Image (cartoon, rainbow, N blue to C red):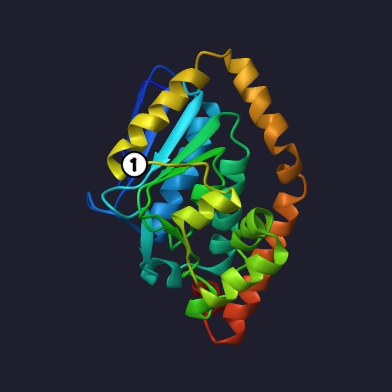
Amino acid sequence: MAFEQVPDWKHLKLSRSGGVTEVLLHTGGGPLIWQASAERELIELFAWLALDRQTSVLILAGTGDVFCANIEATEFRKMSWRDIWSGGRRLLCGLLDLDIIVIAAVNGPALVHSEIAVMADIVLACPEAEFADRAHFPRNVVPGDGVQLVWSDRLGPSRAAYFLLTGNSIDANEALRLGFVHELHAREQLLSRAHELAAAITEKAPAVIAYTRAALRSRERRGFREDLSYGLAIEGLGQHAIGVRGPEQN
Protein backbone atom coordinates (compact mmCIF):
# COMPACT_ATOMS: atom_id res chain seq x y z
CA MET A 1 0.00 0.00 0.00
CA ALA A 2 1.30 3.46 -0.89
CA PHE A 3 0.08 6.69 0.64
CA GLU A 4 0.10 9.88 -1.41
CA GLN A 5 -1.33 12.01 1.40
CA VAL A 6 1.14 12.83 4.18
CA PRO A 7 -0.61 13.15 7.55
CA ASP A 8 -0.58 16.57 9.18
CA TRP A 9 1.24 16.05 12.48
CA LYS A 10 2.03 18.73 15.04
CA HIS A 11 5.41 17.36 16.20
CA LEU A 12 6.62 15.56 13.07
CA LYS A 13 7.85 17.30 9.94
CA LEU A 14 7.80 14.64 7.25
CA SER A 15 9.24 14.58 3.74
CA ARG A 16 9.98 11.68 1.43
CA SER A 17 11.69 10.96 -1.83
CA GLY A 18 13.14 7.92 -3.56
CA GLY A 19 12.08 5.41 -0.93
CA VAL A 20 13.39 7.54 1.96
CA THR A 21 11.12 9.16 4.53
CA GLU A 22 12.73 11.87 6.65
CA VAL A 23 11.05 12.84 9.92
CA LEU A 24 12.20 15.82 11.97
CA LEU A 25 10.98 15.83 15.57
CA HIS A 26 10.00 19.26 16.85
CA THR A 27 7.71 21.28 19.08
CA GLY A 28 6.61 24.57 17.57
CA GLY A 29 9.51 24.46 15.12
CA GLY A 30 12.10 24.08 17.88
CA PRO A 31 13.55 21.03 19.67
CA LEU A 32 11.06 18.35 20.63
CA ILE A 33 9.53 18.58 24.09
CA TRP A 34 8.28 15.13 25.02
CA GLN A 35 4.55 15.08 25.77
CA ALA A 36 1.57 12.79 25.25
CA SER A 37 0.69 14.34 21.89
CA ALA A 38 4.23 13.70 20.59
CA GLU A 39 4.05 10.08 21.72
CA ARG A 40 0.68 9.62 20.00
CA GLU A 41 2.03 11.04 16.76
CA LEU A 42 5.05 8.72 16.80
CA ILE A 43 2.72 5.77 17.38
CA GLU A 44 0.69 6.92 14.37
CA LEU A 45 3.86 7.43 12.31
CA PHE A 46 5.14 3.90 12.91
CA ALA A 47 1.70 2.42 12.11
CA TRP A 48 1.55 4.55 8.94
CA LEU A 49 5.03 3.50 7.83
CA ALA A 50 4.24 -0.17 8.46
CA LEU A 51 1.69 0.04 5.64
CA ASP A 52 3.54 2.45 3.34
CA ARG A 53 5.28 0.49 0.57
CA GLN A 54 6.93 3.68 -0.74
CA THR A 55 9.29 3.79 2.24
CA SER A 56 12.37 1.58 2.53
CA VAL A 57 14.38 3.79 4.90
CA LEU A 58 13.27 6.06 7.74
CA ILE A 59 15.57 8.90 8.82
CA LEU A 60 14.64 10.16 12.27
CA ALA A 61 16.27 13.39 13.45
CA GLY A 62 15.79 16.20 15.93
CA THR A 63 15.46 19.92 15.29
CA GLY A 64 18.02 22.62 16.06
CA ASP A 65 20.73 21.63 18.50
CA VAL A 66 18.71 19.20 20.68
CA PHE A 67 17.26 15.77 19.89
CA CYS A 68 14.94 15.67 22.93
CA ALA A 69 15.93 16.96 26.35
CA ASN A 70 12.74 18.15 28.05
CA ILE A 71 9.39 16.70 29.04
CA GLU A 72 5.99 18.25 29.63
CA ALA A 73 4.04 15.79 31.77
CA THR A 74 0.74 17.65 32.09
CA GLU A 75 -1.00 15.63 29.36
CA PHE A 76 0.26 12.33 30.80
CA ARG A 77 -1.15 13.18 34.25
CA LYS A 78 -4.62 13.45 32.72
CA MET A 79 -4.42 10.00 31.15
CA SER A 80 -5.57 6.72 32.65
CA TRP A 81 -2.83 4.18 33.28
CA ARG A 82 -4.59 1.86 30.84
CA ASP A 83 -3.97 4.40 28.07
CA ILE A 84 -0.35 4.97 29.17
CA TRP A 85 0.23 1.20 29.26
CA SER A 86 -1.31 0.80 25.80
CA GLY A 87 0.59 3.73 24.30
CA GLY A 88 3.92 2.68 25.74
CA ARG A 89 3.59 -0.78 24.22
CA ARG A 90 2.51 0.50 20.82
CA LEU A 91 5.29 3.10 20.63
CA LEU A 92 8.37 0.90 20.96
CA CYS A 93 6.82 -2.23 19.45
CA GLY A 94 5.73 -0.16 16.47
CA LEU A 95 9.29 1.03 15.95
CA LEU A 96 10.84 -2.39 16.50
CA ASP A 97 8.40 -4.14 14.17
CA LEU A 98 9.02 -1.88 11.17
CA ASP A 99 10.24 -3.79 8.11
CA ILE A 100 12.36 -0.87 6.90
CA ILE A 101 15.83 0.33 7.85
CA VAL A 102 15.86 3.10 10.46
CA ILE A 103 18.64 5.70 10.62
CA ALA A 104 18.78 8.10 13.58
CA ALA A 105 20.57 11.45 13.28
CA VAL A 106 21.12 12.61 16.85
CA ASN A 107 21.72 16.33 16.53
CA GLY A 108 22.27 17.10 20.22
CA PRO A 109 21.37 15.94 23.74
CA ALA A 110 18.98 12.98 23.88
CA LEU A 111 18.02 13.01 27.56
CA VAL A 112 14.34 12.06 27.34
CA HIS A 113 13.35 8.80 25.65
CA SER A 114 16.82 8.44 24.20
CA GLU A 115 16.03 4.75 23.67
CA ILE A 116 14.07 5.73 20.55
CA ALA A 117 17.24 7.04 18.91
CA VAL A 118 19.45 4.09 19.82
CA MET A 119 16.85 1.57 18.61
CA ALA A 120 17.71 2.65 15.06
CA ASP A 121 19.71 0.28 12.86
CA ILE A 122 22.26 3.02 12.17
CA VAL A 123 22.87 5.76 14.71
CA LEU A 124 24.69 8.92 13.67
CA ALA A 125 25.48 11.66 16.16
CA CYS A 126 27.18 15.02 16.37
CA PRO A 127 30.02 15.58 18.88
CA GLU A 128 27.67 17.62 21.07
CA ALA A 129 25.23 14.73 21.49
CA GLU A 130 24.82 13.03 24.84
CA PHE A 131 22.55 10.24 26.01
CA ALA A 132 20.77 9.87 29.34
CA ASP A 133 17.43 8.95 30.88
CA ARG A 134 16.10 11.95 32.79
CA ALA A 135 12.42 11.03 32.36
CA HIS A 136 12.14 8.19 34.86
CA PHE A 137 14.05 7.45 38.09
CA PRO A 138 15.38 11.03 38.47
CA ARG A 139 11.70 12.14 38.35
CA ASN A 140 10.52 9.45 40.80
CA VAL A 141 9.17 7.24 38.01
CA VAL A 142 10.01 3.55 37.58
CA PRO A 143 11.99 3.07 34.31
CA GLY A 144 9.68 0.35 33.01
CA ASP A 145 8.35 1.57 29.66
CA GLY A 146 11.04 -0.11 27.57
CA VAL A 147 13.95 2.14 28.43
CA GLN A 148 15.22 -0.61 30.74
CA LEU A 149 15.09 -3.21 27.96
CA VAL A 150 16.78 -1.13 25.29
CA TRP A 151 19.58 0.21 27.47
CA SER A 152 20.25 -3.16 29.07
CA ASP A 153 20.78 -4.51 25.55
CA ARG A 154 23.03 -1.61 24.50
CA LEU A 155 25.07 -1.26 27.69
CA GLY A 156 24.74 -4.59 29.51
CA PRO A 157 22.66 -5.06 32.68
CA SER A 158 25.12 -3.62 35.19
CA ARG A 159 26.01 -0.43 33.34
CA ALA A 160 22.38 0.05 32.30
CA ALA A 161 21.30 -0.09 35.95
CA TYR A 162 23.84 2.59 36.85
CA PHE A 163 22.82 4.67 33.83
CA LEU A 164 19.11 4.54 34.71
CA LEU A 165 19.53 5.01 38.48
CA THR A 166 21.83 8.04 38.29
CA GLY A 167 20.57 9.88 35.22
CA ASN A 168 24.22 10.39 34.26
CA SER A 169 24.87 11.05 30.60
CA ILE A 170 27.12 9.31 28.11
CA ASP A 171 28.83 11.68 25.69
CA ALA A 172 29.13 11.13 21.97
CA ASN A 173 32.71 9.85 22.01
CA GLU A 174 31.95 7.31 24.72
CA ALA A 175 28.78 6.27 22.89
CA LEU A 176 30.88 5.65 19.78
CA ARG A 177 33.37 3.61 21.81
CA LEU A 178 30.57 1.56 23.39
CA GLY A 179 29.09 0.89 19.96
CA PHE A 180 25.54 2.22 20.20
CA VAL A 181 26.56 5.24 18.08
CA HIS A 182 28.16 4.26 14.78
CA GLU A 183 29.46 7.50 13.26
CA LEU A 184 30.18 11.05 14.48
CA HIS A 185 29.72 14.02 12.17
CA ALA A 186 29.35 17.76 12.55
CA ARG A 187 25.74 18.67 13.23
CA GLU A 188 25.30 20.35 9.84
CA GLN A 189 26.52 17.19 8.08
CA LEU A 190 24.33 14.66 9.89
CA LEU A 191 21.35 14.69 7.56
CA SER A 192 23.44 14.65 4.40
CA ARG A 193 25.33 11.61 5.70
CA ALA A 194 22.05 9.95 6.70
CA HIS A 195 20.69 10.48 3.18
CA GLU A 196 23.93 9.17 1.67
CA LEU A 197 23.57 5.95 3.64
CA ALA A 198 19.86 5.76 2.86
CA ALA A 199 20.48 6.14 -0.88
CA ALA A 200 22.85 3.17 -0.85
CA ILE A 201 20.33 1.07 1.06
CA THR A 202 17.45 1.89 -1.29
CA GLU A 203 19.44 0.49 -4.21
CA LYS A 204 18.61 -2.95 -2.80
CA ALA A 205 15.32 -4.72 -3.53
CA PRO A 206 12.54 -3.76 -1.09
CA ALA A 207 12.06 -7.41 -0.13
CA VAL A 208 15.76 -7.76 0.67
CA ILE A 209 15.57 -4.64 2.86
CA ALA A 210 12.50 -5.93 4.70
CA TYR A 211 13.93 -9.40 5.27
CA THR A 212 17.29 -7.98 6.34
CA ARG A 213 15.59 -5.85 8.97
CA ALA A 214 13.71 -8.94 10.17
CA ALA A 215 16.95 -10.93 10.36
CA LEU A 216 18.77 -8.16 12.25
CA ARG A 217 15.93 -7.69 14.76
CA SER A 218 14.67 -11.26 15.23
CA ARG A 219 16.38 -11.80 18.61
CA GLU A 220 15.36 -8.41 19.97
CA ARG A 221 11.75 -8.88 18.86
CA ARG A 222 11.40 -12.19 20.73
CA GLY A 223 9.81 -11.58 24.11
CA PHE A 224 10.01 -7.78 23.79
CA ARG A 225 6.23 -7.28 23.96
CA GLU A 226 5.86 -9.42 27.07
CA ASP A 227 8.79 -7.80 28.88
CA LEU A 228 7.59 -4.33 27.89
CA SER A 229 4.06 -4.99 29.12
CA TYR A 230 5.39 -6.28 32.44
CA GLY A 231 7.71 -3.30 32.84
CA LEU A 232 4.89 -0.85 32.17
CA ALA A 233 2.74 -2.62 34.77
CA ILE A 234 5.54 -2.26 37.34
CA GLU A 235 5.91 1.41 36.39
CA GLY A 236 2.17 1.81 37.02
CA LEU A 237 2.49 0.19 40.44
CA GLY A 238 5.21 2.68 41.27
CA GLN A 239 2.97 5.59 40.30
CA HIS A 240 0.13 4.14 42.37
CA ALA A 241 2.44 3.75 45.38
CA ILE A 242 3.32 7.45 45.41
CA GLY A 243 -0.29 8.51 45.02
CA VAL A 244 -0.51 9.25 41.30
CA ARG A 245 -4.03 8.45 40.10
CA GLY A 246 -5.41 8.47 36.56
CA PRO A 247 -8.99 9.42 35.67
CA GLU A 248 -10.22 5.83 35.93
CA GLN A 249 -9.23 5.74 39.64
CA ASN A 250 -10.88 9.04 40.60
Residue sitting at x 54%, y 63%: 84
- Residue 9 placed where, x, y %? 33, 42
Residue of label 1: 24
Asked if residue 1 can be seen in this view, the reply is: no
Closer to us: 65 or 88: 65
211 left or right of 192 in image: right
Closer to us: 152 or 53: 152
Residue sitting at x 39%, y 61%: 35
Q: In which quarter of the image is residue 172?
A: bottom left
Q: Quadrant of residue 144?
A: bottom right
Residue situated furthest left in the rendering: 29
- Residue 244 placed where, x, y %? 52, 81
**Amino acid carrying mark 1 in the image:** Leu
Residue sitting at x 54%, y 73%: 248
Label 1: few (<14), some or many (≥20) within 10 Å?
many
- Residue 43 vs 71, above or below: the answer is above
Closer to us: 81 or 66: 66
Asked if residue 31 can be seen in this view, the reply is: yes
- Residue 121 placed where, x, y %? 57, 37
- Residue 153 placed where, x, y %? 68, 54
